[in-house]
Amino acid sequence: MPNAWFVSPPYFLALGFLSGVVGFRMGWRAKSRAWLPIVQGVLGWGAFALAWMFVGPAWAAATAGAWVLSSTLVSIYVFSGHPKEADERVMRAAEYRSNMLDWLSTGRGPESKPLATTIAHLRELIWYVAAAVATANLASLVMGAVLLNYMNAYVATLLRAARRTGTVLLLGWNVWSVVRVAAYVVLGAAAAAPLLSWGGWPRDGAAVTRLAMAGAVGVVVDLLLKLALSRAAGRALAPAVDLEAARANRSAEGSLTLDLS
């Protein structure tokens, strides 16, 4: 294999994906709520930093995106088979599941409190960007791992309690959540630029600006989609899940189907 491949974008995408798998498995075996996201974030940052050095900030952001994707896939798989351990080892897993199942049960979501929802989003965004600026994206990736883990633990619960698995696969991860994660990935990459540049790392100012603008648009779109679609999304998802089983963190009663209606 040509040596040039080892400094090409596909290599770093593969490295990011692998770092997500390995980081989760190492952190999971530590059996610690704290160590799980720390190990995930450190390995993700290592792939991100190498990609930044060799192929620039845009591909570094894409590498972090590959880390997110693989972390999500492996964690949902593991959480699905280990519900008790997921509650023990994942920060906010039980709390987040309870809040989301309340949304599915009652139909009352964030659209009922738009101001409070906006303030909560803004507060989270400020903390995330500040962490990215202060640590060249390391602490923000750790924070991102915390968020990913409890969201994925919730999705794993839905899949375990699914009456219509296909519907849960389509709607378990809310579309606004997907947009938010993508926005945070590119914002974290852009916010890493000042500290990395100060440390002598290469900086592509135009690419960083594009990442920052894309991230800013993404967080606005995330909020708008959440306020506009949460009621409809909840109504579509709730019948596909045995909510009683989901609250008990167990499998659904009866047979499952891949019906997408």
Image (cartoon, grey):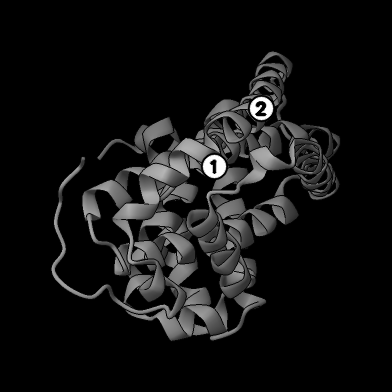
Examine the image and state in which quarter residue 235 appears. Answer: top left
Q: In this view, does 114 lie above or below 19?
A: above
* Marking on residue 252: none
Amino acid on which the number 1 mark rests in the picture: Ser
Amino acid on which the number 2 mark rests in the picture: Gly
Examine the image and state in which quarter residue 143 appears. Answer: bottom right
In the image: residue 180, left or right of residue 20: right
| Residue 53 makes an appearance in the image | no
* 81, 165: nearer the viewer: 165
Q: Position of residue 254 (x, y in %)?
A: 16, 73
Q: Where is residue 58 in the image (x, y as percent from the top left)?
A: 57, 26
Residue under the image location 57 percent in, 71 percent down: 93
* Marking on residue 177: 1
Q: In this view, does 81 lie above or below 116?
A: below
Residue under the image location 74 percent in, 56 percent down: 139
- Quadrant showing the N terminus: top left
* 57, 125: nearer the viewer: 125
* 75, 41: nearer the viewer: 75
Residue under the image location 63 percent in, 21 percent down: 214
Q: Is residue 77 above or below residue 31?
A: above
Spatial CA span between label 1 and label 2: 13 Å
The answer to whether mark 1 and mark 2 are in CB contact below 8 A is no
- Residue mark closest to the camera, 1 vs 2: 1
| Label 2: few (<14), some (14–19) or many (≥20) C-alpha neighbours in 10 Å | many
Residue under the image location 52 percent in, 30 percent down: 59
Secondary structure of the residue carrying numbered label 1: helix
- Quadrant showing the C terminus: top left
Q: Earlier in the sequence, mark 1 or mark 2?
A: 1
Q: Which residue is disc 2 drawn over?
A: 215
Q: Position of residue 49 (x, y in %)?
A: 62, 45
